[in-house]
Amino acid sequence: MFASALRVSALAFNHYSTGVIPMSSVERVYSYSAVLMGSPILLKLFEDNQQAAQAVFHLIKQQEDMLTVNRAHSQLMTINHAAGLHPVVVSRPVFELISKAKTVSLMQDSCFNFTIGPLVKRWKIGFHGDTVPSPAEIQSLLPLTRPDQVMLDPQACSVYLAQAGMEIDLGAIAKGYIADRVRDLLQQMGIHQALINLGGNVLTLGTPRYGDQSAWGVGLKKPFAAPDALIGIIEVAGKSVVTSGIYERYFEQEGKIYHHILDPETGYPLDNELLSVTVISDDSVDGDIYTTLLYGMGVKKALHYLTTVPHIEAIFVTRTGQVILSSQRQFRFTLQDSDYQLA
Ligand code: FAD
Ligand code: MG
């Protein structure tokens, strides 16, 4: 039960914590944490408001219950269980999220594919029992990952997977969507200065309430290093900061790293020059979508593409130690680690 996992602590802002860098010690910040969606969840407020924290964790739990594919039952699993059999009526918000995921999956050259489920389930990366599938297994699963075979009926609010064995997986978009719902809830409760971290999806409301700070400091994690090691600090106010990387969920076999962002073309983990992509945007759902999309494009193509999407900015971290910023309109970045260079 999520309530039992809820922890509350009043902390001075003079220490490091999950991906968030405190910047002064003059105000008290109240941190509430839980483990939901297999991820550490952190909420920071500037007053002790246990009721608000409970409401936030309750909302996340409700959303998880609808969208999870890690349990037998959820709205998503009802669709997956009915693959090849019949359409399933879902709630309007779930329908809208699936429609968005389908649109992004069908974009030209998109590496985002929300029907990647059969491959995710087989690789099990980040879960017990992860192994490298045989090439024959990959070839047998690839035909089940066809976004165009997800039939949506907006009138009936129903979703139908045309082939038996197909499975929707919203792992690359749902945390961003849920972070936005948490922001909406906090705002409805009259809270306009807060930070929520859904295991790598950070969403900031307003500015921190201490001193003359006009921005939150969000740490950019150093890949394959100690959990609190940082490449640098991203300063933002009222923005989402989402990172996708190959160093959080992976396993190693015979010296090779297999990470959880799969190439829908090959069925294997995406293999390019990138260790991570961080997206700064207004909405976290966009941050979640674009981290995956841009990761698949690689640096050169992604930088070119971002010139056409002004509300999305990105930070790329490469295997050769380069940190590349697409632009810096909505954030400031300070490099801290001498193993990395700004390119
Ligand atoms: P992103 O980089 O944004 O996306 C990677 C994830 O998206 C992969 O893990 C996979 O699920 C999927 N994916 C892989 N390749 C592609 C692709 N080409 N296109 C589109 N999607 C792709 N984790 C647990 O350990 N236990 C749980 O019980 C659990 N429950 C969850 C419930 C919910 C509702 C959600 C949203 C997540 C849950 N997770 C759980 C985490 C989940 O398994 C993913 O690992 C997580 O969502 C990845 O987030 P990310 O931002 O790091 O990854
Ligand atoms: Mg994502």
Image (cartoon, grey):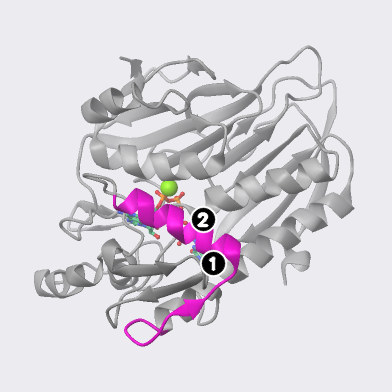
Tell me where residue 126 sits by quadrant: bottom left
The residue closer to the viewer here, 22 or 183, is 183
Dot label at residue 174: 2
Residue 286 part of the magenta-drawn span? no
**Residue farthest along the top direction in this orientation:** 212
**Where in the figure is residue 206, as x and y percent of width and height?**
72, 27
Q: Please, what is the three-letter code of the amino acid marked with disc 1?
A: Leu
The secondary element bearing badge 2 is classed as helix
| Residue at horizontal 54 percent and vertical 81 percent from the top | 73
Image quadrant of residue 29? top right
Closer to the camera in the image, 285 or 28: 285
Q: How many marks?
A: 2
Residue 67 is labelled as 1
The amino acid type found where label 2 is placed reads Ala
* Crowd rating for badge 1 (residues with CA inside 10 Å; few <14, some 14–19, many 20+): many
Q: Where does the image place residue 256, in percent across and percent down from the top left?
A: 20, 52
| Residues under numbered marks 2 and 1 in contact, where contact means CB atoms less than 8 Å apart | yes
- For the point 36% across and 70% down, the residue is 151
Q: Which residues are magenta?
A: 82-106
The 10 Å Cα crowd at callout 2, few under 14, some 14 to 19, many 20 or more, is many
On residue 324, the disc is: none
Q: Is mark 2 within 8 Å of ligand 1?
A: yes
Question: Among all residues in the image, which is located at the extreme bottom?
Answer: 85
